Image (spheres, helix red, strand yellow):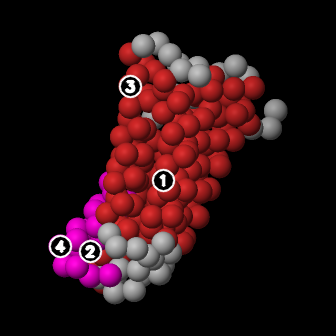
Amino acid sequence: MNLPNKITVFRFICIPFMLAAALINFEYHWTVTFVIYLIGCISDKLDGEIARRRNLITDFGKLFDPLADKAFMLSAFLVLINLGWHTELVIILMMIREFLVAGVRMAASVEGETIPANIFGKLKTLLQMIAAGVAFFILAFMERKLEINIGAKGFNAPQFLEIYCTIAFWITGIVTFISGLKYLKDGWHLIKTK
């Protein structure tokens, strides 16, 4: 297994540690959550860069890198939903998009085709990382600076953070869904009834 693929596997490994840090209420658990989240996001950028620069692109990487991204980001969003903020519909839209794109890509691979990433897909990934990252940063900053206890179930969580998450999640969710429609349009010839 080459280095980019090891980094991809590492991102999968980050998920249970991020969930444990977020859901187990110990001192500075949001700071630990934010650090793990940041490491996961950096690994996402790192594995792709190394694979392209060293020409280490493999079938494993093509399949598991996007799966690692999706699993990592959806885990982060589910942590924030667990705080009690009602953004479940946005997550459902994002999950529909991810299954849709995975299906189109599988159909393309069966036909020996590749559907390249589009600008909406790249923007979607960036917005998802920023939306969750800023929320984790605010939680970490508040628990360290103000010495307040923000529990895993949202105890004492500031209302402005709920407002931020609602707005950020919806913007991200809409861009995510649009990117899914673009993938569907690009791959429609592979799945339409003949």
- Residue at image position (62%, 26%) is 60
Mark 2 surroundings: few (<14), some (14-19) or many (≥20) residues within 10 A: many
Q: Amino acid type of disc 2? A: Glu
Q: Give the side of residue 107 with respect to residue 94, left or right.
A: right
Q: What separation in Å lies between label 4 and label 2 (alpha carbons)?
A: 6 Å
- What number is the disc on residue 143? 2
Return the mark for residue 49.
3
Mark 3, Cα crowd under 10 Å, few <14 / some 14-19 / many 20+, is some
User: Residue at the bottom extreme?
Assistant: 156
Quadrant, the N terminus: top right
Distance from Cα at disc 1 to Cα at disc 3 = 19 Å
Classify 143 as above or below 192: below
**Of the two numbered discs 3 and 4 in the rendering, the one whose residue sits closer to the viewer:** 4
Q: Quadrant of the C terminus?
A: top right
Where residue 39 sits in the image (x, y, percent)?
37, 45
In this picture, which residue range is highlighted in magenta? Answer: 130-149
Q: Which of marks 3 and 2 is nearer the N terminus?
A: 3
Q: Relative to 7, say whether 173 is above or below.
A: below
Q: What residue lies at 65% left-to-right and 49% top-to-bottom?
A: 99
